[in-house]
Image (cartoon, rainbow, N blue to C red):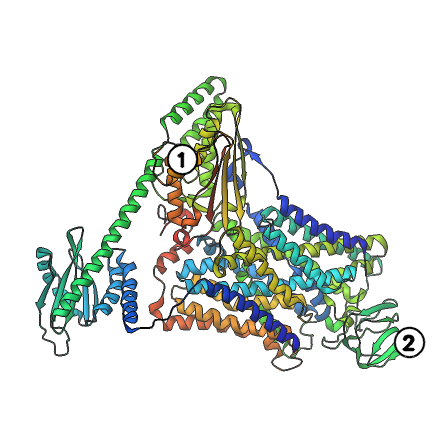
Amino acid sequence: MTSTYAVVAVLGVALGTILVGTYGLRVSRTTSDFYVASRTVSPWWNASAIGGEYLSAASFVGIAGLIFAYGPDMLWFPVGYTAGYLVLLTMVAAPLRRSGAYTLPDFAEARFRSRVVRAVASMLALMIGWLYLLPQFEGAGLTLHTVTGAPDWVGALIVAVVVTVNVMSGGMRSITFVQAFQYWLKLTAITVPIIFLIVAWQSQGAESLTKPEFPTFREDTTVTFQKDTAIHADKPIFINGSGVVDRLTIENAGHFLTSGDHRIGANSQFVFPKGATVPHVHETAHNTNESWSLPLSSNSPFPLYAAYSLIIATFLGTMGLPHVIVRFYTNPNGHAARRTTLIVLGLLSVFYLMPPMYGALGRLYVPELLMTGQTDAVVLVLPSKMIAGVGGELLGALVAGGAFAAFLSTSSGLMVSLAGVLSQDVLRLGGVRGFRMSTVLAGIVPLSMTFVSTGMPVADMVGLAFAVAASSLCPLLLLGIWSSRITTVGAVAGMLAGGLPALTAGLVTMFTDTGDAWYEVLLSRPAAWTVPLGFSVMYVVSLLTPRRVPAGVNRAMVKLHAPENLGLEAGEERT
Amino acid sequence: MQDFLTAGAILIVGGAAVLVLWRGTRNKQSLSTEAQRVTYETLHTAWSAAPPLRAGLVPDAAKKSARHLRTLLDTPALALTDETEVVAWEGVSDHHSADAMSQAEDVFLTGRTQAFDIGCAEPNCPINCAVVAPLTVEGRVVGTLAAYSREASAGLVRATNQVARWAAGQLELAELDRSRTRLVEAEVRALRAQISPHFIYNSLSAIASYVRTNPERARTLLLDFADFTRYSFRRHGDFTTLAEELKSIDQYLALERARFGERLKVTLQVAPEVLPVTVPFLCLQPLVENAVRHGMEGKVEPGHIQIHAADSGAEAEITIEDDGIGMDPEKLRRTLAGQVDESAGIGLGNIDERLRRVYGDEYGLVVETACGLGTKITVRVPKYHAGINGM
């Protein structure tokens, strides 16, 4: 699918980002209309900005893809991405703001008065950031491939370069208003098309989404296989075209695909007849639309474990994401931090209503993605498939532009925080030069990893970043804020005991083929065992080393928990 | 599998690069001879005892330093006292601590190191005698250091004496630290009191000129004046938020505009993200006052002042610019170095000094100026700094 409109939309978003970054919002004010107190960032603006920075590739294209392939189990992704803010709201937002910390390593240092705790927290924040950037770049590659047919690495490179240059030139540095605008842009880009699509679906007879049949091709469909794909056909199909099927080269001829497993070579192109049952990628479960719509239908060995693990990772991981935490600094006080979080919950909930609808409609209109395995593309291809002509193309362009905005804004936020961590804690180089060097380093590592990763769904990859955050930085924040017994030794031990296994598990699932091994789910959804590990190691080690409780812990607790306007520390901010 | 290895390789190379850069910022040396090792260990122990001593003779800190001092002297027990009580007892047999003050009293009287044979009824107690040395700061005995041991050898007396002298040196440094802090605080107080009589006179007469023609404006200006003076005379706190500081600047500028009218043009551009940043109290207002003075001095045409506060990653960057007469860079350098006590310079030098003391030398003022070409002052403030935001 190549669409001029979509290319224009993507380029427009990229150019717009660079322009806004370079020229900034040069709005000058004179004293007459200037009143500082009224100009602090209001919770609404700040919440929109958090939403703009937070809704990433995973939210925009990933969730729809997963729901499209695996069904309602995957609804835990949007629920968890949102509910993470509930935990943040009740347990972390206000105390974190009161601590005065700008980044997570700042919090670690402020609370534990230890350079070592800070160093470990920095390293973990760096790893989480890289793990989170990788799917953004991959998502960009996928989007550009879908709309232009360019190789996957082109989109990744474009996003990486645009973001790096932009951050280096000083643009996009957490400009609240720009990021807030991004949220509304993304919401528009995903909502407007789905309204049209639902209207189209209704006017085409409102076909049931949960028929007890396998998805079928709605028309004769030409499918191009990008890479070697193992598929499974439930019913025999007669296909027509050129390519390699089960090592047999076919040149512009018909071929009878028997029911069972087949391998289709890279760059094959076949026409599948209207009405035929869609074969599916070997790895994913095969469901009728009815069984797809039921929970725990994904045929994985331990669906309940996987669901709980996902819930734990996403509920607890949000607070450990480096680009989320820095946003809370903009709030003037703990009360505003709470209000902001509440609004974020609302904004995210509204946004996350949309992707599942794309996933469900995808089962009816673009089932061939189940066969090519490019399920993440469902949001992108659905509009032009459902609505013929310019209208569909324009909607497709809107979605593609929105997706690109998602990659750019999330990557910018991450890149700024990572560059901050790198320049402060690793390179120890202050000033503009240190920040620029750090930005390049922050971008290069995930970019080079995109060349080797295995096309795992982007939402799954983001889920792994959440798992690492939930196992390492979440215990640090929760126990650090709510227990006065945590010692420096305990903090370091807990972060490493939770973070390292989760990180290893994540890398193994991303870059190896664990196949159907029984432990596969333990590696691809590690949070259910690494999070309790992190928490308990941190607590137990702390109890074993009572002499290492940081000095002044009681004063720190007062500062974290006492409302600012009690005036408990009037005149001694420097304590 | 190959993909995994490649990815692993990239991560390892990336990690290694980070590590190399990290290690590059440190250097380690191995110790070769015995003398070097002994010197290293002694000085290292002494160095560990120094920071708590710098806090003075207070129980928490004294306890920490006593641990290291006992390591230095290698005795079963060691005590630190101030003029009235035992502030730290480190080591075994703390039933002797009750008598420590009676021995210390002799030392307070004589000001010399003395050995006491104290004996002990308990069979397992390793303490038989005490060597008590005075801690003399600026010629006055402020406390004692007592080493307890089985016997008072001449070596122990000499060693205790030396350690006490070293510890007294640290206490003296602590005193120096305190007086330096007091000096800077005094300067801040001077800054607060520095609201110039001219400014008050000018503001009040400007307000007076509006009382009849524009009473509403006069009222607003009076309130601005009240708020501005209240903020500047504030008694508590060395730190404030950028929002508060900018608000006070806003009020100050309102008053100046009442006086200069159309001649004073001000552009403010403030990124809302940096408003919650903690900054030293009165670190910007004097700079703006300087800018107004320099921007308007000896000119008939309008003067333009620009104030920008921008977000820059982990820092906030504030620039204050005027298009006035500028300063002589050489003179400015001397002012900042504290050599010339010029009226225009006291604000600049004091702010520069305070910023450096709080955030470190790389956060001093940056002034770009030349005679007749205006002045641009840049202040950078980290959003988080362990010294201020730390708990």
Residues marked 1 and 2 touching at CB (< 8 Å)? no
- Same chain assignment for discs 1 and 2: no
At 44% from the left and 30% from the top, the residue drawn is B224
Q: Amino acid at mark 2?
A: Gly
Residue A92, x across and y down, in percent: 49, 58
The local crowd at label 2, few if under 14, some if 14 to 19, many if 20 or more residues have their Cα within 10 Å, is some
Badge 2 sits on which subunit? A
Which dot marks residue A252? none
Residue A439, x across and y down, in percent: 57, 57
Tell me if residue B267 comes above or below residue A184 in the rendering: above
Looking at the rendering, in which quadrant would you find the N terminus of chain B?
bottom right
Q: Is residue A296 left or right of residue B351?
A: right
Badge 1 sits on which subunit? B
Tell me if residue B260 comes above or below residue B339 in the rendering: above
Which dot marks residue A254? 2
Residue A236 makes an appearance in the image: no
Q: Amino acid at mark 1?
A: Lys
- Name the residue carrying label 1: B331
Quadrant in which residue B342 is drawn: top left
Q: Is residue A346 left or right of residue A91?
A: right
Q: Nearer the viewer, residue A238 or B365?
A: B365
